[in-house]
Image (cartoon, rainbow, N blue to C red):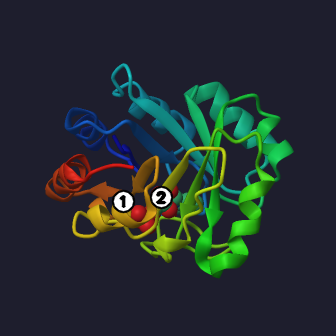
């Protein structure tokens, strides 16, 4: 079964819908540079709408350690997801399980960075370039998905209901992550797109 994370949620209705449709994880973008930014108090209110067995993930990108500590204290996320140039030791220092996003925009050059995060619980390969924000809807060449990395790999970047079955067939990821592909506008999810995306993943043969 391919796991599903719906990311960039800002509304309680969208959190409840994602959970009802069977999403395994929901992501709140907590770095201020995002158009989908939710502050710690708002994220905690969203978290309260997350039912048991659905994982809550807080996204950060080169944020100050004091701010990351505040996010952890107020939100109490199940996991962090780091999107910037944070080193493995920096990510691990917060004592919360984490995913590290790898910017695949540079193609094969990005693959070297995959080896630099041995403490990450999983790696999220995203389509944007190094130093750019995620949630951009950019794809990368799915055939670059490595087969010899120890951690679970999550495929992200430009996924939609229309392409996710082919993405799973080519990349054979442990999970998929989607944001703009299920949106009406940044941070506002489209119920029909979300339903069609999750149905398409569930119908696709997994690795
Ligand atoms: O969504 C943002 O605005 C954002 C800003 C800064 C860092 C990360 C951000 N989002 C990450 C994601 O939502 C997803 O992990 C991923 O990039 C998939 O996005 P999409 O291509 O839109 O499906």
Classify mark 2: residues with Cα within 10 Å, few (<14), some (14-19) or many (20+): many
Label 1 close to label 2 by CB (< 8 Å): yes
Q: Which label sits on residue 168? A: 1
Q: Is residue 203 left or right of residue 105?
A: left
Residue 34 visible in the snapshot: no
Quarter of the view holding residue 107: bottom right
Who's the residue at 27% across and 62% down the image? 165
Looking at the picture, how far across and down is residue 17, in whole percent? 22, 39
Relative to 132, does residue 86 appear above or below in the rendering? above
Q: Earlier in the sequence, mark 1 or mark 2?
A: 2
- Identify the residue shown where x is 82% and y is 52%: 87
Q: In terms of image quadrants, where is residue 89?
A: top right
Query: Which of the two residues, 39 or 91, is positioned nearer the viewer here?
Result: 91
Seen in the picture, residue 137 relative to 98 is either above or below; the reply is: below
x 80%, y 55%: residue: 116
Q: Label 2: which residue?
A: 155
For mark 2, give the secondary structure. strand
Assess mark 2: CB under 8 A from ligand 1? Answer: no
């Amino acid at each position: 079964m391919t796991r599903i994370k719906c990311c960039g949620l800002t509304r309680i209705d969208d959190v409840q819908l994602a959970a009802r449709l069977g999403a395994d994880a929901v992501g709140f973008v907590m770095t201020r540079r995002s158009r989908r930014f939710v502050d710690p108090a708002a994220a905690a209110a969203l978290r309260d709408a997350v039912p048991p067995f659905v994982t809550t993930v807080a996204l950060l990108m080169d944020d100050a350690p004091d701010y990351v500590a505040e996010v952890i204290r107020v939100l109490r996320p199940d996991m962090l997801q780091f999107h910037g140039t944070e080193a493995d030791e920096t990510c691990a220092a917060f004592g919360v399980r984490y995913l590290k996003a790898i910017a695949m925009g540079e193609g094969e050059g990005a693959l070297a960075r995959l080896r630099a995060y041995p403490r990450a619980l999983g790696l999220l390969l995203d389509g944007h370039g190094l130093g750019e924000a995620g949630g951009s809807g950019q794809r990368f060449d799915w055939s670059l998905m490595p087969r010899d990395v120890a951690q679970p790999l999550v495929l992200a970047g430009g996924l939609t209901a229309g392409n996710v079955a082919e993405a799973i067939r080519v990349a054979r990821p442990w999970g998929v992550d989607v944001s703009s592909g299920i949106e009406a506008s940044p941070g506002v999810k489209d119920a029909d797109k979300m339903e069609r995306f999750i149905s398409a993943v569930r119908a696709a043969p997994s690795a």
